[in-house]
Image (spheres, rainbow, N blue to C red):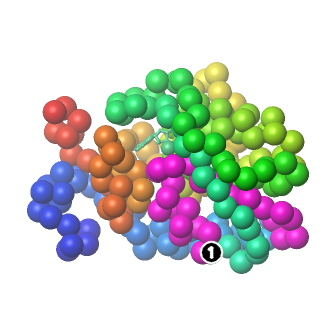
């Protein structure tokens, strides 16, 4: 963990599960794959606010083909660490997605409700294709009623609530460069 963090933040972290260096390596590989797969195609990357911002910023700089970017915002969790299963659109894209290849960039897939909702939304808008790129996947958490394929995954992680690298707990910890597990006392407060 970088020395620029306060003792308070350090004391709230139980474990680092992926360092920013490890993320950098993997993002480079994913960027190369995407550049190859979409070569010659009109690609629009749509970042899901706010959790994907760090991953998104790193990823687009590892893509070597021309791309467009846009953002959406959805809500599914509120301030809880357990998914409600009800997804609502808070902010839509500002561009026309018709005829484009869309790649949704999300921080993490858990139950799958959020990405299923977003994928269906863009599939209904005359897009050429809709694929998904996630920094993290917790496969054991997927809801049994949800069928969804992730096309590009950074890392599969165990069923633990993680923060850092853009991910939050109650809107905090997004600025931690590494992917961390919080100390249990933070949740029980
Ligand atoms: P899903 O709809 O259950 O797949 O939830 C996906 C959303 O829940 C993600 O976009 C995250 O915002 C949030 N989420 C799920 N697991 C975590 C976690 O471990 N840390 C932080 N946010 C999470
Ligand atoms: Mg999210």
Residue 80 occupies quadrant: top left
Q: Position of residue 160 (x, y in %)?
A: 37, 41
- From this viewpoint, is residue 181 visible? no
Question: Where, quadrant-wise, is the C terminus in this rendering?
Answer: top left
Residue 91, relative to residue 59: is it above or below?
Answer: above
Side of 127 relative to 162 (left or right): right
Q: Is residue 121 above or below residue 44?
A: above
Q: Is residue 116 left or right of residue 11?
A: right
Residue depicted at x 51% and y 49%: 49
Vertical order, 29 against 149 (above or below): below
Q: Residues within 10 Å of mark 1 (few under 14, many from 20)?
A: some
| Picture quadrant where residue 177 is located | bottom left
Evaluate whether residue 68 shows in this view.
Answer: yes
Q: Residue at horizontal 32%, vertical 61%?
A: 176
Residue 97 in the image: x percent, y percent? 79, 50
Count the numbered circles shown: 1
- The part of the chain drawn in magenta is 38-61
Looking at this view, name the residue that lies furthest to the left. Answer: 7
Residue at disc 1, secondary structure = loop
Which residue is the extreme one toward the front? 94
Task: Please tell me whether residue 92 belongs to the stretch shown in magenta.
Answer: no
Name the residue at 40% across, 51% down.
167
Nearer-the-camera pick, 62 or 26: 62
- Residue 53: say if magenta: yes
Q: Position of residue 108 (x, y in %)?
A: 51, 46
Of residues 70 and 160, which is closer to you in this image? 70
Quadrant of the image containing the N terminus: bottom left
Give the residue pinned by disc 1: 62
Q: Given the current orientation, which residue lies at the most extreme bottom position?
A: 64
Q: Is residue 167 left or right of residue 3?
A: right
């Amino acid at each position: 963990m970088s020395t620029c963090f306060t003792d308070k933040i350090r004391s709230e972290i139980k474990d680092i599960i992926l360092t920013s260096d490890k993320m950098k390596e993997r993002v480079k590989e994913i960027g190369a794959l995407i550049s190859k797969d979409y070569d010659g195609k009109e690609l629009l990357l749509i970042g899901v606010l706010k959790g994907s911002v760090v991953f998104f910023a790193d990823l687009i700089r590892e893509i070597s083909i021309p791309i467009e970017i846009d953002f959406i915002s959805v809500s599914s969790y509120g301030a809880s660490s357990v998914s409600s299963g009800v997804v609502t659109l808070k902010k839509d894209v500002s561009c026309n997605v018709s005829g484009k290849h869309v790649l949704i960039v999300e921080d993490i897939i858990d139950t799958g409700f959020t990405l299923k909702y977003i994928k269906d939304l863009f599939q209904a808008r005359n897009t050429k294709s809709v694929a998904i790129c996630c920094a993290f996947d917790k496969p054991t958490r997927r809801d049994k009623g949800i069928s969804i394929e992730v096309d590009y995954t950074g890392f599969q992680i165990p069923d633990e609530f993680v923060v850092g690298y853009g991910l939050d707990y109650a809107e905090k910890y997004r600025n931690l460069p590494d992917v961390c597990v919080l100390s249990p006392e933070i949740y029980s407060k």
